[in-house]
Amino acid sequence: MPEIQYSAGVCNIGEAEIKQRRRIGYIGFGLTLIATIVYLGLIYYIKLDPLFGVIIFIPAEISSIGLIQAKNKFCAAYGLAHQQNISSNLGLTIKIEDRVSQREDRNKAIKIIFQSLGISIIITIFTIIIGIIIGQINF
């Protein structure tokens, strides 16, 4: 496996950080599934207001931000804080001093944040729509 190198706006985390974000993304995905099943069950059985589906946004955001960061090999928080960690130690960051690199990292971080927000909003809206449909079913 080739060694990961820092590249402004492209890659600011190494394998340990990538694995951590992937793990967080999978945990968020599991929580999203569980929360969705509970939410839809509550709508069906106790006629919960479908707008309570906004709670799905939180685990969906955890999942999407984690998985997007892992896929991109880029930590949005590090990008905004002008840091990088391509080492094998979690949380051991190095300050990025170059202004051009800082700007490229910030732009990439903002892009990742908006991508994850968009995905989470779509998942939440879709879940609420399903909840509304289930809530209208009379058995």
Image (cartoon, rainbow, N blue to C red):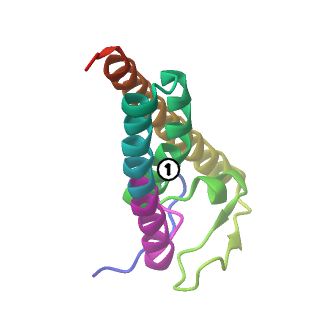
Q: Quadrant of the C terminus?
A: top left
Q: Residue furthest front?
A: 139
Mark 1 Cα shell of 10 Å, populated few (<14), some (14-19), many (≥20): many
Secondary structure, mark 1, is: helix
Q: Is residue 111 left or right of residue 126?
A: right
The location of residue 138, given as percent across then percent down, is 29, 16
Q: Quadrant of the N terminus?
A: bottom left
Write down the residue under mark 1: 65
The location of residue 129, given as percent across then percent down, is 37, 20
The location of residue 111, given as percent across then percent down, is 52, 38
Q: Residue at x 46, y 30 (%)?
A: 46
* Quarter-of-image position of residue 125: top left
Q: Is residue 35 left or right of residue 52?
A: left
Q: Residue at x 42, y 74 (%)?
A: 4
The location of residue 115, given as percent across then percent down, is 47, 37
Q: Which residues are magenta?
A: 11-29
Q: Amino acid at mark 1?
A: Ile
Q: Main secondary structure of the magenta part?
A: helix
Q: Nearer the viewer, residue 65 or 73?
A: 65
Does the magenta-highlighted stretch encompass residue 10? Answer: no
Is 48 located above or below residue 29 in the figure?
Answer: above
Is 99 located above or below residue 95 in the figure?
Answer: above
Does the magenta-highlighted stretch encompass residue 23? Answer: yes
Q: Nearer the viewer, residue 109 or 66?
A: 66
Q: Nearer the viewer, residue 79 or 57?
A: 57
Residue 75 in sight in this render: yes
Residue 72 in sight in this render: no
Is 136 located above or below residue 114 in the figure?
Answer: above
Q: Residue at x 38, y 20 (%)?
A: 135
Q: Is residue 90 left or right of residue 122?
A: right
Q: Residue at x 70, y 64 (%)?
A: 96
